[in-house]
Image: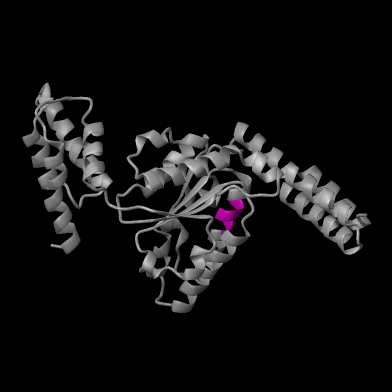
Amino acid sequence: MANANQLKALLQSHLEGDDSRFYSVAMQVAAHEAKRGHGKLAGELRTLVDQAKASRVIGSEKKTVPISKPRGELANLLSVSYPKARLGDMVLSSDLAQQLNRIILEQRHAAEILSHGLSPRRKLLLVGPPGTGKTMTASVLAGELGLPLFQVRLDGLITKFMGETAAKLRQIFESTRQARGVYFFDEFDAIGSQRGLANDVGEVRRILNSFLQMIEQDDSHSIIIGATNHPDILDNALFRRFDDLLHYELPDDVHIANVLKSRLSRVSVKNISWKRLAAKANGLSYAELTRSTDEVLKTALIERAKSVSEKDISHALEERCKLSKRLSTGS
């Protein structure tokens, strides 16, 4: 059984409310018993630890986070919000909708999954062009699961001082254990291209290695999301650290029409060819479609128009296409 030091460590961690240390010591005891040939006892101890972790998930769902917002230095690293977004708010391909549904289901059944020695999907990599729904996905997962959304602030995370960025990363991953939520690293691949870094390739590599190590070792119940517009520059080792990879693409004509109909449902529209409009909007992202329809709605409000025409929508889409083209060419 446990030796004197392990018993003291168990009691001390319990008194201090340090669950991570308590579980760690308990697993050490289980490993010790397994070495002594007490396989059944070791298995029972591991099961009890898994059940304790599962009950912690249930408790954390009722009381999501112990703090309302990041404090101290974390306030410079994380911004917090409480999204109300739902999966039905997004226009998604059937494959992507199935993936997200599966993630939500596994999280809702996390206690049962953990009690059987399995792990629900919670480390996610979102890949795709800008404006295709990656940020919205983080909000939807937080909203569906009733969790806070912690967005990592790259401007606060990345510094020019050697070792400081890795130390700040460590603080964020410590927070994933203390405050359950959805942690969103948007464009985290940009770590290697920040002007503030003194062109030190070795330091960039150390930062990326630190991230890989921390995400692999993370045993919290938080959902960790990395998003990138440039999967081609990511190390293959990074992909293996995630439980699921979600691919986002620009909307096709069917999805474009669905977005336009949904966004303009609050106003009267007559004699409109959605197919024709979708063809004009080809190449625009979901975010750009949303901005286009917002312009149509604002114009209707200002002019006190009771309906919008195909010409109104077409004009807004054409303007957005011109702007998108200028931005992409830098002219």
Residue 146 point in image, percent of width and height: 52, 34
Residue 18 showing in the rendered view: no
**Residue drawn at (8%, 30%) of the image:** 309
Q: What is the quadrant of residue 327 in the picture?
A: bottom left
- Report the predominant secondary structure element of the magenta stretch: helix
**Residue 153 at what x, y percent from top left?**
43, 53
Task: Please tell me which residue is depicted at 78% across the width and 47% down the height of the picture.
Answer: 47
Position of the N terminus, as image quadrant, is bottom right
User: Which image quarter: residue 215?
Assistant: bottom right
- Residue placed at 21% from the left, 39% from the top? 257
- For the question of whether residue 117 can be seen, the reply is yes
Residue furthest out toward the left: 311
What number of labels is visible? 0
Residue 295 in picture, x, y percent from top left: 16, 37
On the image, the x and y values in percent for residue 64 come to 59, 36
Please tell me whether residue 219 belongs to the stretch shown in magenta. Answer: no
Tell me which residue sits at (83%, 49%) in the image.
Answer: 45
In the rendered image, the vertical position of residue 327 relative to residue 69, given as above or below: below
Q: In this view, does 39 lie above or below 181?
A: below
Tell me the magenta residue range.
170-175
Is residue 310 found left or right of 221 in the rendered image?
left
Q: Tell me: 271 left or right of 79.
A: left
